[in-house]
Amino acid sequence: MARRWRKGALRSGGRRGLGAVRGCVLAAALTGIALTGTAEVQGLVRWWLDAALWGFVGLLWADWAIHLHAALKRGVDAAKAYLRSPASVVDALAALAVPAAFAAGAGAPQAWLAGAVWVLKLVPSSPGLAHLARTVVNEAGPLRSLGVLFLTVLVLSAAAMTATERHTAEAFGSLPSALWWVLVALTTNSYPEGLVPQTALGRAVGTAVMLFGLGLFGLLTGILATGFAAEGRRRDFLRAWELVARVPFLEPLGPGGSAELAHCLRRWDVPEGTTVVRRGRVADCMYLIAAGEVEVDLERGAKRLGKGDFFGEMAILGGDGARRTADVTTTRPSTLLILDVADFRPLAARYPALAVAVEATAARRVAELLAEGVAAKNPDPLGRRGSDGDAG
């Protein structure tokens, strides 16, 4: 068990470590670009800096080739899909930007500035950005309304400032220049370039502009924050729904019951070698295996459970204070769905098929364990201590 835990931890840590290394290398390359434009970096230091940057360009080409090769191994359609994807565009821009700048005749400092596009390599590895993009699409209606309101305030305020302050400063002499003044005041909540309105009406308009700016950006923040949270809940529900559909014994619930259950489940992606349940701990939830495999360490042997199975049901079949009767450890990376006792009982009252399915599976396990001669001390699947037919 300890070896499996160490192996899983090493794999998980290796992935995180690789991501950290990639980020550090990219940060070092961008720092190198900044240094190429300084007069202090000359001679041998400049030669080594250029060599390091060209080495990074080579890594970008290799990264692009590896991604394309991996897509080709999955088939021509997968390769075409990759070439049309945003990730491919980012890979191509990162690899071609600097060589294209040098080929166009740009000098070294200017050509290396094209490497600023390397920062786009962070985008595909940032799922939160895709989440934000979906939020913007979902909230397009409120955002358009906010844009119309912003434009209305901008134009009307610029017209008012032009009418009231035309003779006090050149910045208010025409509508375009007043538009710039109002735009800066709206977005920065301050008077641009110290141009303070001189008339009482102009000052009132300026104050109103800054207050509107605060309100508009507050509305923008509220719309995006609410939409971002709603998109997260929607994504989690769809994932839970998909995972519930993979568990065979939940089929009797039907669409309505599955949807309600999906709202109650919490997803847990577990690395290999993780101890999920420990013997003797208080049982307050059960686990459904949506993907992967776990090993149940019984007192007289071990049993493996895979996709579609569940364990820890004594937490809901037994009374309050029931204890875990086995250790459960993942044998490979797994996705578990957690159902708390407090959520199960109302669901079981509305959908008796759920309780029947859990009890029937628990009874079948006990029968199997009895046949194998490894049943626990109390083989009653509804007993208060439970057998290890409950798998933890």
Image: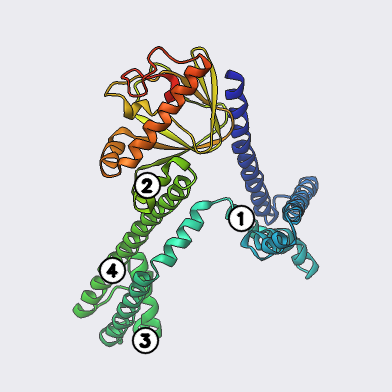
Which numbered disc covers residue 210? 4
> Which residue position holds label 2?
253
Q: How far apart are marks 1 and 4 (CA)?
A: 34 Å
Q: Distance between the residues labelled 3 and 1?
A: 39 Å
Q: Count neighbours of disc 4 (C-alpha within 10 A) and say few if under 14, some if 14 to 19, many if 20 or more.
A: many
Q: How far apart are marks 1 and 2 (CA)?
A: 48 Å
Does any portion of residue 194 appear in the rendered image?
no
Q: Nearer the viewer, mark 3 or mark 2?
A: 2
The residue located at (77%, 62%) in the rendering is: 99
Q: Which amino acid does label 3 sit on?
A: Leu
Q: Position of residue 373 (x, y in %)?
A: 51, 14
> Which residue position holds label 3?
175
> Which residue position holds label 1?
119
Q: Distance between the residues labelled 3 and 4?
A: 18 Å
Q: Where is residue 32 in the image (x, y as percent from the top left)?
A: 68, 50
Q: What residue type is labelled 1?
A: Val
Task: Give the vertical position of 261 relative to 3 (above or below).
Answer: below
Q: Position of residue 208 (x, y in %)?
A: 23, 72
Looking at the image, how many numbered discs can be counted on the residues? 4
Task: Give the vertical position of 10 relative to 241 (above or below).
Answer: above
Report the side of 304 relative to 194 (left or right).
right
